[in-house]
Amino acid sequence: MSIEPTFFLLIGFFVLIYFLMIRPENKRRKSHEEMINAIEIGDEIISSGGLLGKVTKINDQFFEITLGQNIKVNIQRTAVSNVLPKGTISSI
């Protein structure tokens, strides 16, 4: 009994898809999750919608950020795009 060459081609295709698509996405998701879990009150963040603000309150699923004087907005944790260096908002 011999194994068909198309079987090896199929296995090779799945390995290629894993290393080119699935594995990089898992690494990206894990690093984003670590970044979100490390956010503390006072950190300056930018949301995926482009809002730039300072974190004032942290809940299980939301961050409350201050956009300006007396302007507070709640955003989902997953909407955080990046954590900025402290002092970025005041320098703009």
Image: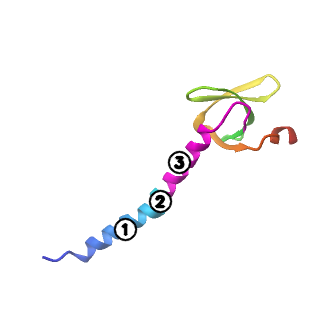
Q: Mark 3 points at which residue?
A: 29
Write down the quadrant of residue 75 in the picture.
top right
Mark 2–mark 1 distance (CA, rounded to whole Å): 12 Å
Residue projecting furthest to the left: 1
Q: Name the residue under label 2.
A: 21
Q: Residues within 10 Å of mark 3 (few under 14, many from 20)?
A: few
- Indicate the amino acid at tag 2: Met
Q: Which residue is drawn at 75% across and 34% down?
A: 53
- Residue 77 horizontal side relative to residue 83, left or right: left
Sooner in the amino-acid sequence: mark 3 or mark 2:
2
- Indicate the amino acid at tag 1: Phe
Viewer-nearest residue: 61 or 10:
61
Q: Give the range drawn in magenta.
A: 24-44
- Indicate the amino acid at tag 3: Arg
- Residue 21 horizontal side relative to residue 1, left or right: right
Q: Position of residue 22 (x, y in %)?
A: 45, 56
